[in-house]
Amino acid sequence: MFPLWPLVKALLPMIGLLVLVVVFKVIVEEIYYRYFYEKETNENSSRQPTPEAKKLSDELIKLGHKAELEKWDGYKHIDIAIVPAKTNIEIDGSYHNYRANTALRDLERTFYSLEKGYITIRIPNSLVRYKLAETVNYIDKILRVRNGKNINTTSNIYGNSTRTT
């Protein structure tokens, strides 16, 4: 029979290092989460828009939409609010997918906005960074539908014809 103790003894330093790395990662994520997401926010707190939110907002304004950055709705700050279309746009970094508590808070905020008649569109940072024109095009279509305006589309994402409204 193969004695396991020499193998375990050889692996203990690596296992200990792995445990330390995991613990360090959890601590750093918790500090990051608390710093960015558990700060008290209110109407008077100053929040600067992210570069992605600013870029997307600027493009929507060029198309004639009344986009407002970091608008306070009485519950939270909204990255981009288009009040006439009752639409909120949240630009999310990857951290929104890493923590269940963050994702649940996002869902809760979406629900509260919906109760007020607003839809929430969640856009990953990567879409603004790498597919800005396409992202703006689809958001523009959504906003025009929300405003009751006609849109002309010839095909949907599956390549099928769609109706013209």
Image (cartoon, rainbow, N blue to C red):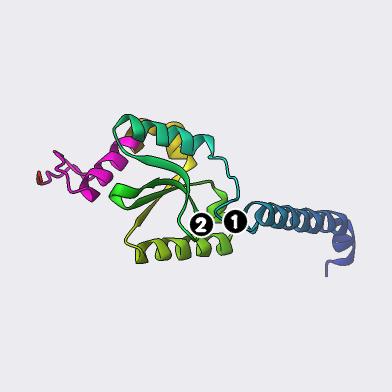
Frontmost residue, 108 versus 82: 82
Q: Which amino acid does label 1 sit on?
A: Thr
- Residue at 50%, 61% (x, y): give it: 75
- Residue at 79%, 59% (x, y): give it: 19
The range drawn in magenta is 136-162
Q: Mark 2 points at which residue?
A: 76
* Residue at the farthest front position: 44
Instruction: Tell me, yes or no, whether the highlighted magenta stretch contains residue 137.
Output: yes
Provide residue 62's location: percent of width, then percent of height: 33, 29
Q: Name the residue under label 1.
A: 41
Is residue 30 something that shows in the picture?
yes
Frontmost residue, 20 versus 50: 50
Relative to 84, is 121 on the left or the right?
right
First in residue order: circle 2 vs circle 1 = 1
- Residue at 14%, 39% (x, y): give it: 152
Relative to 1, is 124 on the left or the right?
left
